[in-house]
Image (cartoon, rainbow, N blue to C red):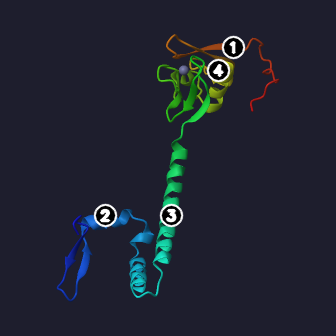
Amino acid sequence: MQRGFIERKGDRKTRHLIATDKGNALITVMPEQIQSPSMTAEWEQKLLGIERGEYEAADFMDGISGMIAGLVATYEKAKGADALMSRNKVIGTCPHCGAEVLEKQKGWFCSNSECRFILWKDSAYFTKIGKRLTSQIVERLLKDGRARLKDCKSQKTGKTYNADILLSTEADGRPQFSMEFDKRKGGNSDGGKSPR
Ligand SMILES: [Zn+2]
C-alpha cells in the first residue's frame, strides 16, 4: 500500500484490497502465472498448512523457487532471442587495419573505432550501377579485395554489363571502389569460379 499499488476499501468486516491504476499497470507487465489469484490462494493455503504442521516449509520453498526459476528461464530465453537478433555478425577483416568488420543494421563497420572503414548498405556507388551491396558481396570484397558483379546497369544507357568491383581504402580507412570491365567481348564469364 505504501507504494500506491493497492488501497484498502470497506469496513473491518469486509476488507478489500483494490488495485489502483498504478497497480493495474504493474499487473499487466507481470507474468500471467504470478497475476493469478488462484496461485496466491494456493500459497496462502500452503502457508496455513505449514503453520499447522501439515505441510513442510522446505517443500513450499522448493515449489516457489522452482516456479521462479521457470519464469526466469522463460524470460532469459526471450531476452536471448532478442540479443541474437541484434548481435553484430563478424563478416570479415578490415582491409585497412585488419580488425573485424561487423554487420550492423545500416552497413558493415570496422570494429576499430579509429578506423573509418564503413560499407553502407545503401551505398551510393552501388546504387549508381543498379546494384545493392549484399553481405555476400562484402564477404568477397573483404576476402579478395574484389568481387564480380553481373548485370550491372548503366544509368545513362540502360545497358547491362558485368564487371569486377575493386575495393581499396583511403588513408583514414574510408573505402574506395573502382571497376574493372570484362576484357573479353560477349564471352561467357570465366566459369571457373562459381559463387558459393
Ligand atoms: Zn579498420
Residue plotted at (49% across, 13% down): 172
Q: Which is more N-terminal, label 4 or label 1?
A: 4
Circle 3 or circle 1, nearest the eye: 3
Residue plotted at (50% across, 64% down): 69
Q: Which residue is mark 2?
A: 25
Q: Which residue is mark 4?
A: 159
**The quadrant where residue 127 appears:** top right
Above or below residue 67? Residue 99 is above
Above or below residue 81? Residue 100 is above
Circle 1 or circle 4, nearest the eye: 1
Q: Which is more N-terminal, label 3 or label 4?
A: 3
Assign the C terminus to one quadrant of the image: top right
- Regarding mark 4 in the picture, which secondary structure is present there? loop
Residue 29: x and y in percent read: 38, 62
Residue 115: x and y in percent read: 50, 19
Q: Which residue is mark 3?
A: 69
CB contact under 8 Å: marks 1 and 4: no
In this rendering, position of residue 16 left or right of residue 192: left
Dot 1 amino acid type: Phe
Dot 2 amino acid type: Ala
CB contact under 8 Å: marks 3 and 1: no
- Residue 181, which numbered label? 1
- Regarding mark 1 in the picture, which secondary structure is present there? strand
How far is the residue under mark 4 from the one under mark 3?
Answer: 63 Å
Circle 2 or circle 4, nearest the eye: 2
Dot 4 amino acid type: Lys
Circle 3 or circle 2, nearest the eye: 3
Dot 3 amino acid type: Ala
